[in-house]
Image (cartoon, helix red, strand yellow):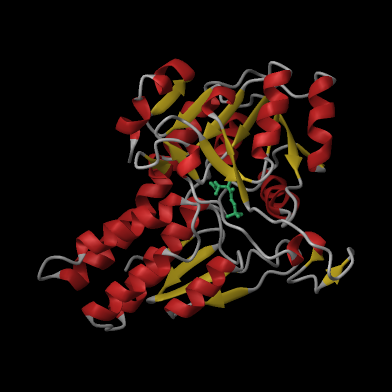
Amino acid sequence: MRERRGLGLVVAAGRLELLDQSRLPHTRQWRAIDTVAAMVEAIRALRVRGAPMIAVAAALLVAVRAEAGDDRDTLIEAIETLRSARPTAVNLSHAMNDLRRAMTGADWRVAVVAAADALADRDAALCEAIGNHGAALIAPGERILTHCNTGALATAGIGTAAGVIRRAHEQGKNVAVWVDETRPLLQGARLTAWEFGMLGVPYTLITDSMAAALMARGQVGRVIVGADRIAANGDVANKIGTYGLAVAAHHHGIPFAVAAPGTTLDPACASGADIEIEQRDAAEVRGVTGAAGDWCWAPADAPAANPAFDVTPAALVTHWILDKGVFDRDAVADGCLVDAVS
Ligand code: MRU
């Protein structure tokens, strides 16, 4: 198993460690993850998160277990347990399919480790391609709004939507970014702000409810978000709040782009109606849970809904920025996404 050092994941000497994203940015706690149960807990608690990254982390944990000597049946059970850790992001399921295929031959132990390494390497390469294709779309001086966290913490590379913005910044395009805080778990405020700060990308943090008003004032030139699953017809499941941004961008005539690797495409879903939306604990909406301690500002028994993702119809998306290139609505309506799977 190859050594690797990412912003949120390290593999060294056959050990896997995750930077606990639920505690960032104020606490930097690395956790050794060496069992399937620990990885499932880390995925469910969003200690590791982002559609591409949960796939990579789960695959590398299977490789850790293979190198530790787990037998074939145990590993197959591990793959199926990990597959169901979170339901909406399809990358995890695709990655587990790759590992299952690798386990069919006589040399399955070597093959499954190689497959996990290849998944991580490939994700970094797909991010590079997305970043380069997407940056070409961006005009000098654009003010870009983004949602949730789609950067190096969420992938094995530079990120998807955040990777596009990073490349445009590095190309001297003088971009400025509105970072949505992304309630309820604040991935924008805690993680994207942290990453952009380290990269020197100029950003301004806003609450989610400010986005439409900024659009109305002409202060947003483009929206770029990531995706957890893209259906064959181009409908996009992404962090809750994405759909509202797309409606507001459409109303104001602002381009709305989705950046994702081909591993986020799911041709088995004809439309967004087929995508399962994860429902999370109401406590996340009633207040803050986790690293900061529990702080409940609502009545403790307030009924609260907490769908973690929403679906944006393809009709509201203007560009799909994939590793294979940038696709517009006509290309997507012609069915191009089915051939863009990585
Ligand atoms: O619940 P999260 O934090 O895993 O949600 C993440 C998102 O919605 C991202 O936009 C998506 O996974 C793409 S990450 C490159």
The part of the image, by quadrant, that contains residue 180 is top right
210 lies left or right of 284 = right
Give how far across and how far down residue 3 sits, in percent: 39, 66
> Is residue 194 positioned above or below 218 on the image?
below
Location of residue 213 with respect to 21 vertically, above or below: above
Residue at the extreme left: 106
**Left or right for 96, reference 6:** left
The picture places residue 193, in percent across and down from the top left corner, at: 73, 48
- Location of the N terminus by quadrant is bottom left
Residue under the point 23% across and 82% down:
71
User: Could one spot residue 155 in this view of the protein?
Assistant: no
* Residue 9 image position (x, y, % from top left): 51, 64
Measuring 36% from the left and 19% from the top, which residue is drawn there?
A: 334
Tally the marks: 0
* Quadrant of the drawing holding the C terminus: top left
The vertical placement of 233 against 260, above or below, is above
Q: In which quarter of the image is residue 64?
A: bottom left
Is the residue 144 above or below the residue 162 in the image?
above
Regarding residue 108, the answer to whether it shows in the image is yes
> Residue placed at 35% from the left, 38% from the top?
267
At a point 67% along the width and 21% down the height, the residue shown is 250
Nearer to the camera, 287 or 135? 287
**Picture coordinates of residue 234, whole percent (x, y):** 46, 30
Residue in the foreground of this view, choosing between 177 and 316: 316
Is 303 or 94 nearer to us in this picture?
A: 303
